[in-house]
Amino acid sequence: MLRVLVIDPVAKSRKALGALLTGETDIVVVSMRETIDGAVREIRIQKPDLLAIDARALEADHGAINQIMSETPLPILLLVDETQSKDDSVVVQALRQGVLAVLQKPSSHSHPDCAELCGQIRSLAKIPVVRHPAAARSRRQTPPAMQLSSLPKQSPGPPRRKVIPEVVGIGSSAGGPQALTELLSALPCDFPGCVLVVQHLPRGFASPFADFLRAGISLPVQLATPGLQMVPGQVILAPDDAHLVVEYKGYVGLNHTGPVLGHRPSVDKLLLSLAKSYGSAAVGVILSGIGSDGTAGLSAIREAGGLTFAQTGESSAVNGMPRSASESGAAMFCQHPSAIADSLRFSFAKEKVQDGSR
């Protein structure tokens, strides 16, 4: 049985969430609390596998997650209600301090998001969390869980190629924010490629996530808009509830077709469009996340002659998307985020040198 501790300041919402979870045969709610005060003590007593916390419980104490991860680290799922006012700083700070995923809270037991919530809990609860996350370190420092000295063996970087890379597409989900920050912060300000990013988030939180990235990297970050020009050295983030694609080479587009594998924006949609528009000049990257979104798109980039990467399982907070990409053969190289950044710098820089020699 998976043991879940629930913290929600609203009695009606807390009761509904507890009832939803106790209706699952493999989940038991060990405690339901109104405030985050005393959470560390409660975690030590109840020993939950996961903490599910409503974002409103953090509004009075933005450092609460930091304390929990310092003293009693465990997987944390942040829940948001689409009817509540959104305090962007709460979400940004929680992501920075180590929350693995942010999800929309289901409005009823019959809501389709119920299955996703329970699925996320099952996946996240199995993740070993043993270190204090990014909040306690400088934003430019390599995350403790991914220090080079402790990393497993990984694929070597890409060999020399004649094709000039032009664009990088990155997909991530649960556990992805920290890996994404590590990768992007290692890219130079004059990186010669445009970077397009799809991060699975609940509706309404693309903007605060853009703020989260801006606080941790030197490259400029912009939310995608229809027809936005792709500029080298720029990070373009998928907006809320729309697929980010490249419709014409050098320009991004947005479409609102149905979700893919339950996601809109979809990593597959982005990478498939890069394979079509850029072919062998495209680079695809899959980071931490649940499920298999991105595998088909990464495979398309590889088949088109482009470079493809997946984060190593050992360095992934959630090894669903990376494992799918690796086991399917879609990923040519499996590396930790900072090594992927090294490979990107090497690939783009060496091509610039080759161009200059012609």
Image: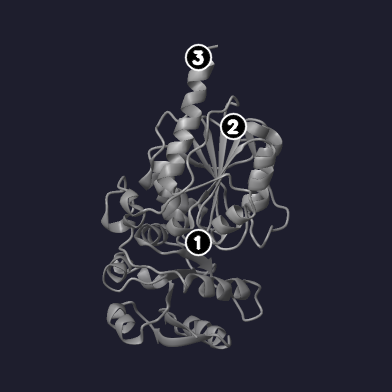
Q: CA distance from mark 1 to mark 3?
A: 41 Å
Asked whether, in this view, residue 337 is left or right of residue 172, the answer is: left
Q: CA distance from mark 1 to mark 2?
A: 29 Å
Q: What amino acid is found at the position of numbered circle 3 in the picture?
A: Gly
Disc 2 to disc 3: CB gap under 8 Å = no
In this picture, is 191 found above or below 179?
Answer: above
Q: What amino acid is found at the position of numbered circle 2 in the picture?
A: Gln
Name the spot of residue 45 as percent of width and height, x first. Answer: 31, 86
Q: Which residue is depicted at the point 35% across and 79% down? A: 35
Q: Which residue is depicted at the point 30% across and 57% down? A: 135
- For the C terminus, which image quadrant? top right
In this picture, is 217 found above or below 99?
Answer: above
The residue lying furthest to the top in this view is: 358
Disc 1 to disc 3: CB gap under 8 Å = no
- Tell me which corner region of the image, top left, top right, bottom left or bottom right, holds residue 332: top right
- Report the mark closest to the observer, 2 or 3: 3
- Chain-order first, disc 1 or disc 3: 1
Name the spot of residue 338 as percent of width and height, x first. Answer: 40, 44
Determine whether the residue tagged by mark 2 lies in a helix, strand or loop. Answer: loop
Asked whether, in this view, residue 70 is left or right of residue 208, the answer is: left
Q: Which residue is depicted at the point 31% across and 79% down? A: 39
Q: Which mark is residue 229?
A: 2
Query: Where does label 3 land, which residue?
Result: 356
In this picture, is 84 found above or below 274?
Answer: below
Query: Where does label 1 land, which residue?
Result: 174
Q: CA distance from mark 2 to mark 3?
A: 25 Å
Name the spot of residue 93 as percent of width and height, x first. Answer: 36, 59
Determine whether the residue tagged by mark 1 lies in a helix, strand or loop. Answer: loop
Label tally: 3
Determine whether the residue tagged by mark 3 lies in a helix, strand or loop. Answer: helix
